[in-house]
Amino acid sequence: MNLFKIVFLMTLFMGTMISVSSFTWLGTWMGLEINLLSFIPLLKKKNCPYSSESSIKYFLVQALASSVFFLSIMMIMMESSMINESIMNPTLLMIINSALLTKMGAAPFHFWFPEVMNGLTWINSLILMTWQKIAPMMILSYTMKLSEYIMFIIIMCSIIGSIGGLNQTSLRKILAFSSINHIGWMISSFLMNEFIWMIYFSIYSIISVTLILMLNSLNVFQLKQMFVMMSKSSMIKFSMMINLLSLGGLPPFLGFFPKWMIIQQLSKSYILLILVMIMMTMITLFFYLRITYSSLIMSHNELNFNPLPTDQITNLNFISSFISITGLAICTLIFNFI
């Protein structure tokens, strides 16, 4: 970590905080722009040959979404000043939501997300999957109203996020499509309250940090490489399997707890929606189970890359894996107590 990265990371965090805490639309837009301009320099890496391509793609898409967002803000301000009302036009509301969904990479505005993430390092991918979604999602919670458009977005995120990851061999693309599926669950949590979204996002971030730090320390980017590393050490195999299944939402693990809360709340009013989401999540869980099952029955004797030493896996990964196992029971007791 040099001074260059620290400065841009600080402004990255500051831009998100400005967007979330702003009282005006203009301040929200300025925070999003600060966040964007701080993240672009962090994407450029000397040892990552596709980082320049990814940074250009990311900038063009985010700049387009920001322009649409700013134009919608100006139209809202002009309309409210002419008719002396603060009620949003449904068409402008849909345009604002579309710009925010494009920024976070939700389907059907997801065309850039897997491609950009496939050219990034693991740490930048982690920032893109977690922190960069906070500001657009919080702003979306301020403007979102239950409508056919929001229901369509939730269903599209569930379908595309699950089916898109089936034929992928790149781990970054698999996690990108899994993130799209999780976006659908997070948006649906706004239909109840923001507290459930905070729980879901926190648990998703913890599991993603654990998994990506492990993949980064192993220098693994493809499925075949991961099979090799998992065959070298039973502890690595155990930790990887636990975190993958927890990210997929298998019931014994921590990743199932926020899904359980959303299912419990949505089943009271939106039964068809939750059925579609559950069925699509089963497909997401399928390609995680396929990875873990293949690592158990397959053996690899050939290495076509230079792996890092396996002792670089820190104790934090194993502690987090233990939390993934026992976290569901602990959270269940707390949830029932509340």
Image (cartoon, rainbow, N blue to C red):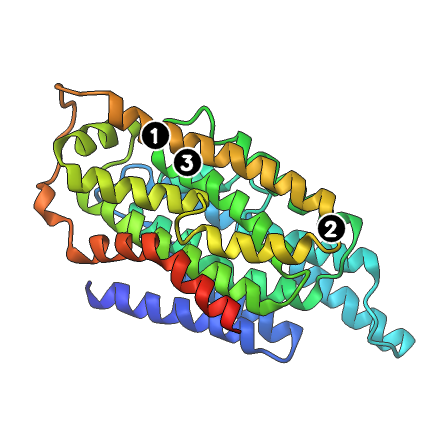
Camera-side residue: 207 or 4?
A: 207
Query: Could you say where residue 315 lies in the image, as x and y percent from the top left?
Result: 16, 56
Marks 1 and 2, the one that precedes in the sequence:
2
Instruction: Please give the label number shown on residue 270.
Output: 2
Residue on which the image places disc 3: 173
- Single out the mark in the foreground, 3 or 2: 2
- For label 3, the SS is helix
Camera-side residue: 24 or 64?
A: 24
The kind of residue tagged 1 is Ile
The reply, left or right, for residue 99 in relation to residue 46 is right
Marks 3 and 2, the one that precedes in the sequence:
3
- Single out the mark in the foreground, 3 or 1: 1
Q: Badge 1: few (under 14), some or many (20 or more) residues near its Cα, within 10 Å?
A: some
- For label 2, the SS is loop
The reply, left or right, for residue 231 in relation to residue 129 is left
The reply, left or right, for residue 329 in relation to residue 81 is left
Q: How far is mark 1 from mark 2, CA to CA?
A: 32 Å
Q: Residue furthest right?
A: 83
The kind of residue tagged 2 is Tyr
Camera-side residue: 113 or 286?
A: 286
Please name the residue shown 37% across and 59% down the image: 327
User: Can the viewer see residue 165?
Assistant: yes
From what the image shows, is residue 217 above or below residue 225? below
Query: Could you say where residue 300 lies in the image, as x and y percent from the top left?
Result: 17, 20
Residue on which the image places disc 1: 291
Please name the residue shown 18% across and 46% down the image: 217
Please name the residue shown 33% across and 37% down the image: 50
Q: Badge 2: few (under 14), some or many (20 or more) residues near its Cα, within 10 Å?
A: few
The kind of residue tagged 3 is Lys
